[in-house]
Amino acid sequence: MNGFNQYVALLRKELLLESRQQHTLYGVILYIASTVFVLYLTMSDPGADTWSAQFWITMLFISINAVAKSFLQESRSRMLYYYTITSPVVFILSKLTYNVILMIVMSIINLLLYTAFMGDVTESFLQFFGISLLGAMGLSLVFTMLAAIASKAMQQASLMAILGFPIIIPQLLLLMRLSKTAFAEIFKEGALMQLVLLLLALDVLIIFMAIILYPFLWKD
């Protein structure tokens, strides 16, 4: 079986496991709903800056909760089986793709709940929707790679959080800056596209780092 077929088979395996273990997915959705509801009770009419900051902080913790389980559920015996049937590059690419899909779904749910409870304070909802999808993709890529590193140590979820916060701060700052364009802040011509390209460049860099570094973890 060639690399592409292996990639498709591993991605289908991830989706099949998710459909059979729906309690984990529902747990993340419940976490999103409860977080948004608590924010609504404490601050029912936030300003644009507060609304945006709360949204991305929520997305950060959703990423940690949703992505961590992708490697937590892989036992040592299962990893040994993967070692015999596929390559590390195909394996990590399938994990990255699955977590991107998962975080895009979680981002849509989070944004819809925020809009329902906190109101729509954006000037361009579609623009913020696109930014949220871009941000979800970036967060999932970062935390998938960190989860792969943390999976080789004990206390995986806590280690991933410790490693992730310093790394994710620059990306969060870019996302919050980019989000301001959806709240009618005026940017210089071309500045919006520069921020988008910078975020995409960071995502591509993370993918290349995963392809280069994960084979060393794979051998452990």
Image: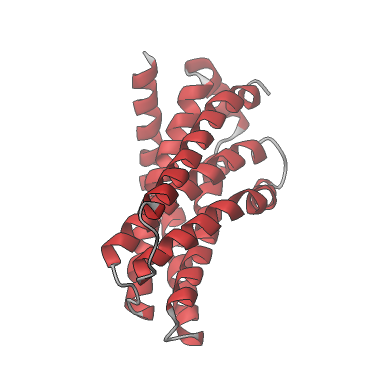
x and y percentages locating residue 109 in the rendered image: 35, 63
Relative height, residue 198 to residue 119 (above, below): above
Q: Which residue lies most toward the right here?
A: 154
Q: In percent of the image, x 49 and y 52: which residue is there?
A: 66
Q: Quadrant of residue 216?
A: top right
Q: Residue at image x 59%, y 27%?
A: 214
Q: Residue at x 65, y 20 (%)?
A: 219
Q: Residue at x 55, y 36 (%)?
A: 74
Q: Nearer the viewer, residue 32 or 50?
A: 50
Left or right: residue 111 versus residue 162 is left
Q: Is residue 103 visible?
A: no
| Residue 100: % across, % down | 41, 44
Q: Quadrant of the C terminus?
A: top right
Q: Nearer the viewer, residue 199 or 164?
A: 199
Q: Quadrant of the N terminus?
A: top left
Res 48 quadrant in image: bottom left
Q: Position of residue 213 (x, y in %)?
A: 61, 27
Can I make out residue 87 in this image? yes
Work out whether residue 81 or residue 154 is closer to the camera in this orientation and state it: 154
Say if 111 sits above or below 91 in the image.
Answer: below
Q: Position of residue 34 (x, y in %)?
A: 47, 73
Numbered label tally: 0
Q: Is residue 167 above or below residue 33?
A: above
